[in-house]
Amino acid sequence: MRMATPANAIATAPHPTPEAEEIYRRWLQFLDDEFTRHHVPERRSEIVRDQLYQIYLGRPHGGKLNLTLTSELPGNVVSLTLDPENVTLEAGHFKDIDRKKWAPLKPLLWFWKMFDRSPLGLNHWLGLRFRCMLGRHIFAHMGTGVRIYHGVDLTYGYNLTIEDNVEIRQGVVLNDRGGIKIGKGVVIGSFARIYSHAFALDDMENVSLTAIEIGEQARIASHAIVLAGQKVEPHAVIGDFPSEKR
């Protein structure tokens, strides 16, 4: 698996030790190979479950749970919830979801969320590469040189296209129910929210879907909101950025 180097990377960027980098790359390559090889939802769920067991519980998955002792019920709940097959995600309730596309992606979306909620998700070097690796198996398209930071929230994933050299900062919401296309070189600031659906004011069950396209080199400021139907032209700036006073 080729790890693309962002165009704006600098030689002095923080870097893990050679031993750690080798282990990180081997793990990412293993996951990339497994998700390339296996598309059946049940098998992907097993892969994710086994990885999360070791990340959260520090031991391989195996053996039967003791279901008779009430003192072990919390541990059993944790163990069972690490398996994507036992998890309900909000997107699964939406009527417009494409169940055929969603099924093989659900385990990966759970992995995305749980990786970021673990100590591993705070490892900047590893996290950037993990999300890009996983994104290539989730998104409709993933370009090169993409940087996705901690805590980015996805809805379906399969309606999301990200072109080259895009930077998505921490805590961004990408609600791709109607489709989102992010053009080359776009920067989306921390905690910005992009929505491709809208509700009727008098009926919250009445949802309209409208694809969003963010033009090349556009800038979406931190905490800015892009609503369904809003057009973001190339090089446009949405929201306010900190600037030097003159």
Image (spheres, rainbow, N blue to C red):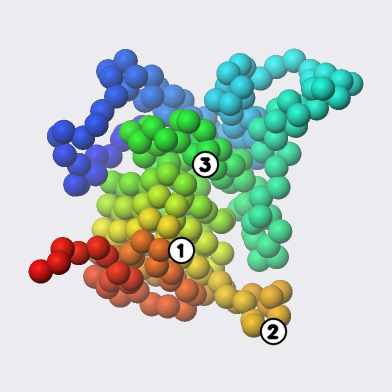
Residue 77 position by quadrant: top right
Nearer to us in this view, 45 or 228: 228
**Do labels 1 and 3 touch, CB within 8 Å?**
no
Is the residue marked by circle 3 packed among few (<14), some (14-19), or many (20+) residues within 10 Å?
A: many
- Amino acid identity at mark 3: Trp
- Closest to the camera, between mark 1 and mark 3, is 1
Is residue 163 visible in the rendered structure shown here?
Answer: no
Nearer to us in this view, 136 or 167: 167
- Amino acid identity at mark 1: Arg
- Amino acid identity at mark 2: Asp
> Which residue lies most toward the front here?
245
Circle 2 — which element?
Answer: loop
Is the residue marked by circle 1 packed among few (<14), some (14-19), or many (20+) residues within 10 Å?
A: many
Circle 3 — which element?
Answer: helix
| Screen quadrant of the N terminus | top left
Q: Which mark is residue 202?
A: 2
C-alpha separation, residue under disc 2 versus residue under disc 3: 35 Å
Q: Which mark is residue 193?
A: 1
Circle 1 — which element?
Answer: strand
- Compared with residue 2, is residue 160 higher up or lower down, i.e. above or below? below
Q: Which mark is residue 112?
A: 3
Q: Residue at x 40, y 63 (%)?
A: 223
- Closest to the camera, between mark 2 and mark 3, is 2
Nearer to us in this view, 34 or 224: 224
Q: Earlier in the sequence, mark 2 or mark 3?
A: 3
List x then y, in percent, for residue 136.
43, 44
Q: Residue at x 50, y 47 (%)?
A: 138
